[in-house]
Amino acid sequence: MNNNNKIINDIDAIPSLVQSKRQIDRYNLDVDAQAILVASRLMAAGAKLGHASEIHFSKFGLSTGRYRLLADLEDNEGEELPSQLAEHLGITRATVTGLIDNLERDGLVSRRSSSDDGRQRSVILTEEGAKKLREMAPEHFARLEAMVGLLNIEERSVFLDLLGRVTQGISALTGELGSKPKENISNE
Amino acid sequence: MNNNNKIINDIDAIPSLVQSKRQIDRYNLDVDAQAILVASRLMAAGAKLGHASEIHFSKFGLSTGRYRLLADLEDNEGEELPSQLAEHLGITRATVTGLIDNLERDGLVSRRSSSDDGRQRSVILTEEGAKKLREMAPEHFARLEAMVGLLNIEERSVFLDLLGRVTQGISALTGELGSKPKENISNE
DNA sequence: TAAATATAATTAGGAACCTAACTATATGAG
DNA sequence: CTCATATAGTTAGGTTCCTAATTATATTTA
């Protein structure tokens, strides 16, 4: 009886403050250990959530990406262009093609060529796809709600505020070093 | 001049409260829209952070997974068994094998067979691997610190507390429905 | 001691993501 | 009208993760 999924439980290995301090000390860096801890914890939480999300959706025969595509389709009267889906979901058109292939194979969406523009092939939510969303909605939303159940209403507001600011700060990872994150007004 | 990477910027499409409400209303569900919003925002933030993290590490010729493996090795005197790495990083041994293959090809780690137990092949951080970590540390930690720069010290503490509780709640996605993680302070 | 079982690492094959290159169709400049 | 260019979607090939099966080595049991 070999137990292959011990690992799953160990994702709970949460980064500690001493760990952060040790890393900083090793190279004599002038950074705040608490700040590093926040960043590390958020990364760990994001990974854990992504992983849990895949397990959750797999119970309905979907993946996170396929569910998001279906939900976006539902939010747009059941019909969209692949390029619109890519934009809404923040993934490339190539990835959308793959997800559609997969969903079409399962009968949850279908493709239709446009007469307007011969290059376009819009994606349509089938009745079976709509049924899938309908069936999973109660459990799906109940679980999402339960996820934040340890926070009361006020705490959720505070969390939303703080998370929003940290999310803005994510650009510091990829942007120019020393440039403050831009305000939330999109400008370019 | 075709612009293939417009998508990147659109990952900023943040879930809104009206969106959450619309989804809930569609199926007449009895869940709190704000709770769903928190969950959706956290998922979006996690995905965005994961993506930014890959871009960040790719500037040093690494990926998030390869960096984490190297860092864990450094935290353990530069030598570990693949199974220990898998446990520490929360990934499977199969994935560790792939990461090691990759890192070994780049000369950042090497493998050594054990004389104790013929099945084991420990992983060693090479001088080149250590050098890589040393070189990237200042920029890496500076960027992590900058990421949470929009939060003051008190706010970071609050965020850490709230994030910790939400992280506990993630098990609600995969665990038994109706089993609360601990006690539920909220009232609805 | 021999056979059954457990364990360490790897290999094989799949899914979701990516970038780059390709095909077909549309559009715009001479 | 024609040719260059832009755009929509797909295909090809890469990476990181996964699960399941495989190989080799230990360990336990009968």
Image (spheres, coloured by chain):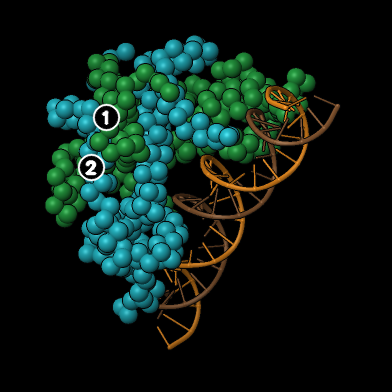
Chain colours: A green, B cyan, C orange, D brown
**Residue A30 picture quarter:** top left
Identify residue type, mark 2. Answer: Ala
Gap between marks 2 and 1, in whole Å?
A: 13 Å
The residue labelled by disc 1 is A180
Q: Return the chain for callout 2.
A: B
Mark 1 Cα shell of 10 Å, populated few (<14), some (14-19), many (≥20):
some
Location of the N terminus of chain B (image quadrant): top right
Task: Output the chain of dot 1.
Answer: A
Above/below status of B39 relative to B101 = above
Q: Tell me if residue A69 can be seen.
A: no
The one nearer the camera, C30 or D1, is C30
Vertical placement of residue B135 versus A71, above or below: below
Q: Residue at x 46, y 15 (%)?
A: B19
Position of residue A102 measured from the top left corner of the image (x, y, whole percent) = 64, 38
Residue at 51% in and 35% down: B5
- Say few, some or many: other residues with alpha carbon within 10 Å of mark 2 (under 14 / 14 to 19 / 20 or more): many
Q: Indicate which disc residue B166 carries.
A: none
Q: Badge 2 is on which residue?
A: B142
User: Is the C terminus of chain B in the top left, top right, bottom left or bottom right quadrant?
Assistant: top left
The answer to whether residue B96 is left or right of residue A67 is left
Q: Residue at x 43, y 66 (%)?
A: B105
Secondary element at tag 2: helix
Badge 2 and badge 1 both on one subunit: no
Count of labels shown?
Answer: 2
- Provide residue A123's location: percent of width, then percent of height: 67, 26
Is residue B77 in view? yes
Name the residue type under label 1: Lys
